Image (cartoon, helix red, strand yellow):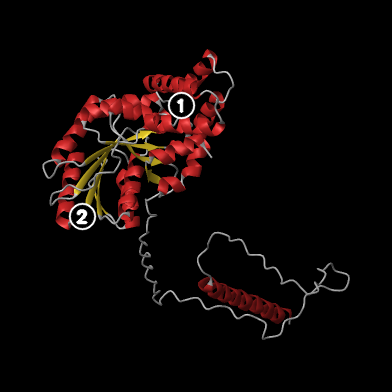
Amino acid sequence: MEIVILAVVIAVVVVGAIGGLVVGSRKKKQLPEAKAPSVTPTITAPPTEPHVGDEAETPRDEPRRTIEEVDLPVAEPSASAPVVEEAPAAPPALEIETPEPTAGRLVRLRARLSRSQNALGQGLLTLLSREHLDEDTWEEIEDTLLTADVGVAPTQELVERLRERVKVLGTRTPEELRALLREELLQLVGTDFDRAVKTESGLETPGIVMVVGVNGTGKTTTTGKLARVLVADGRSVVLGAADTFRAAAADQLQTWGERVGARTVRGPEGGDPASIAFDAVKEGIAEGADVVLIDTAGRLHTKTGLMDELGKVKRVVEKHAPLDEVLLVLDATTGQNGLVQARVFAEVVDITGIVLTKLDGTAKGGIVVAVQRELGVPVKLVGLGEGADDLAPFEPEAFVDALLGD
């Protein structure tokens, strides 16, 4: 009996062992190849709704909107849909201006001129009104004239004439003194000059005007303003931008021309000024223009080579037609230094007229007398401000009246 029980136990153990081996072999076949241990991600449970006692944001009192008040989102164009770009708007056409008439322009600007100039006239009237005109007073009168850049020789002449006439006049009322001083200043400024800007050649070619002057005198601006003066007087104008050495000079001149409908002939920056001047005259003839205005580079009067080039521009232009006018632009604020400039330019080209700029910004109106005496040519135009129509024909009577004030 014990033997039978033992045999049964052994059989059970054997069967169990065999079963374990089979199961173990099956598990080994199903397991994948051993890999490096990986970190098991931690799964965080979604937050639960706050319970009573938990901290929560205090709800804000906001007005509720109806469905009609809620704006719908704007649909953005899909990437595949072609975007149609609007064509850029064409720039507006530049409106051509009508310049102010030149007749009587200096009279209209008289108040502006008298504000800065009448220190000269009023100072002289005050000194001449003294009861006793001794030597000290006459020296003060001379100093007043010299300070106003009248020049030494014209000052001495004026003082001598005033001395004689005051001595003859005897008792002097303010009205008599003013009339006396006005008469003498008019004689000094000169009323017998021909101050018209020559713009008619008398030939089949346009009138040719060349504008010269040193840097900083407002030469290019003056050329543009002169174009306005001519257009206001009913003339057709072609501009020649022969100032090729100063950056944007041609652009500046072209802008002035476009404002009054005048065409500008220009070339590359740093190009040959004589060639551009030649082309400007050539095109002016082809178009049948009345006047060709040539703006030259602002040469420094100390540089002989550049001054020689200015002479070349003149010679090249005259292959088409003779120059009718050579205007020298001077800054009235430079005083006696302007006379040095005028002298050098007069040696290179035949100056026929003077343009005084910035005459409204100085009490040295005597430069009008000095420069005319130096060159023997008249002041034909004066600049009295920054406005487009502030270039005026010079009128001696209006100028002297502005000096003396009302």
Task: Report the front residue among 158 and 293.
Answer: 158
Residue drawn at 21 percent across, 32 percent down: 349
Residue type at mark 1?
Answer: Ala
First-in-chain label (2 vs 1): 1
Q: CA distance from mark 2 to mark 1?
A: 41 Å
Q: Is residue 116 visible in this depiction of the protein? A: yes
Q: Dividing the image into 4 quarters, which one contains the N terminus?
A: bottom right
Give the number of the disc on residue 148.
1
SS for callout 2:
loop
| Mark 2 lies on residue | 289
Above or below, 239 relative to 368: below
Task: Report the front residue among 155 and 313.
Answer: 155
Above or below, 72 relative to 207: below
Give the number of the disc on residue 328.
none
Residue count near mark 2 (Cα–Cα under 10 Å), binned few <14, some 14–19, many ≥20: some
Task: Report the front residue among 154 and 389.
Answer: 154
Task: Report the front residue among 41 and 6.
Answer: 41
Residue at the top extreme of this rendering: 135
Q: Position of residue 360 (x, y in %)?
A: 46, 38
Q: Dividing the image into 4 quarters, which one contains the C terminus?
A: top right
Residue at the left extreme of this rendering: 319
Q: Is residue 390 visible in this depiction of the protein? A: no
Residue drawn at 41 percent across, 48 percent down: 105
Quadrant of residue 391 in the image? Answer: top left
